[in-house]
Amino acid sequence: MDEILKTRVKDLCTKIRSGQIKSIEIVKACFKRIKEIDPKVKAFLKLNEEHSLKQAAQIDGKIKTGAECGSLEGVPIGIKDNIMIKGESMTSASKYLENYISPYDAAVIEKLKEAGAIFVGRTNMDEFAMGGSTETSAYQKTANPWNIDYIPGGSSGGSAAAVSSGMVPFALGSDTGGSIRQPAGFCGIVGYKPSYGLISRYGACALASSFDQIGVFSKTVKDAFVLTSVIAGGDYRDPVCETGEQTDYACGIYNPDILKTVRIGIPKQLSNYKADEEITKYFGEAVNKLKLKGVAAVEIDIPAYKYVPALYEVIMCAEVSANIATFDGIRYGYRSSNGRNLNDEYAKSRAESLGYEVKKRILFGTYVLGAKNYYRCYHQAQRVRTLLINQITDAYKKCDFIFSPATLQMPVKFGEKLSEECDIFLTAANLAGLPGITVPCSFTSSGMPMGVHFMGSRFSDAKLFQITDAFERISGFDINKYPNL
């Protein structure tokens, strides 16, 4: 593996702007790495090699003249295939959108273009982000770089695998119920989901609108906050995107005494669920490492955690049903040639182009929104969601951050299923609109990485970066170790 690919993003930016490293050298190294290992991993659905090399050459020429540069000028990045880039295809890993060309840029893409980032290619995902293994993609299954017989997690498995294996320095994903943080934990990298409303969702293909957030994959917490500083901020086109001013997430990031002022909450409910033995062991070690640095660990009680899987299933599927209603085969996307009338054409266009997982969620969502079931299912779920949010809010009176394993299971082999409780502590952050970061903490006896999860109160993202950066420095995890592919 080319050493240039092990350079952290902040250092890459500095060296590119100073002329120490040329952008074209980095881009060439990325594509060389992709050609060597992506046939095994299958992280990318589409590559932009010719355009990327041309853009890198232009950036190097621009820097040579002393022109002003963007904060990510010349740095390569992978983009999950449900985020729009004007003039490019966006399939959401579905046959339905196979020939769809984005008519505009997503808000995060506008900001990345302004910052000078280079879009290397489109990363694989579960179809319409519905899944937790990247097996429901209509095109290919992405493998975990640490063991290609195992899943990388999902739905943003392509982005996680690309960063973990060193194909790109960082990547964008989307997180609806843990879809960034779960694969980050499985692949041994940092995965960050922002507070609901911190980063604009404009131009991202909607799954469940009250959960969805665009977020970041990177090798380190520092790289995550560099990218977040670029893409965060208010956007009038997304009605829930509340923050108007850019925040310097690097502020105070290197505070060596930060851990002495922190209280972490360990959910009492952890003991209610069966976790893999090694996850329990290494999570306990992580808690002890934090305590040794002055962190106060307290037990918190959130009884409504037991409702999280059911809450997520009911509300998410209801919102899926509403959002996918626009996919009728008439205005855009796959259109069946077998329809006998208008309604038949709607039905056949969906039946012929959508996968099993998508159809299952649409059907269940339509059921819970039906006249006979709305108050019994959907309305009741929203009431219990409020109960969960209130209990989490009360827990923050005792602690600053909630600390848990990223997942309760290690990755499984293709075709095997994860338990419905596996991502329970990740999904709670989506239900409550809170920020969460998965940080790798150890390798298991089988050589697979595992991660821990920090969840903060809403809009505590900057402080969350400070804490997780400090934990990263004491975790003992070797961030310079890459899969041997």
Image (spheres, rainbow, N blue to C red):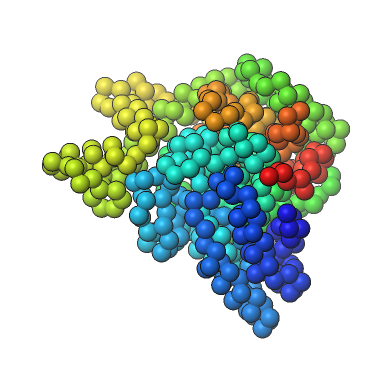
Q: Residue 406: horizontal and vertical position, in percent? A: 65, 32
The residue at 40%/23% (across/down) is 380
Q: Is residue 314 above or below residue 231?
A: above
Q: Residue 273: horizontal and vertical position, in percent? A: 62, 18
Q: Quadrant of the C terminus?
A: top right
Residue 8 is left or right of residue 84, and the answer is right
Q: Residue 351: horizontal and vertical position, in percent? A: 28, 37
Q: Is residue 97 above or below residue 3?
A: above
Quarter location, residue 320? top left
Residue 283 is left or right of residue 329, and the answer is right
The residue at 56%/72% (across/down) is 54
The residue at 34%/20% (across/down) is 376
Q: Nearer the viewer, residue 144 or 398?
A: 144
The residue at 36%/30% (across/down) is 360
Residue 104 is left or right of residue 66, and the answer is left
Q: Nearer the viewer, residue 32 or 287?
A: 32
- The residue sitting at the right extreme is 292
Q: Is residue 241 above or below residue 272?
A: below
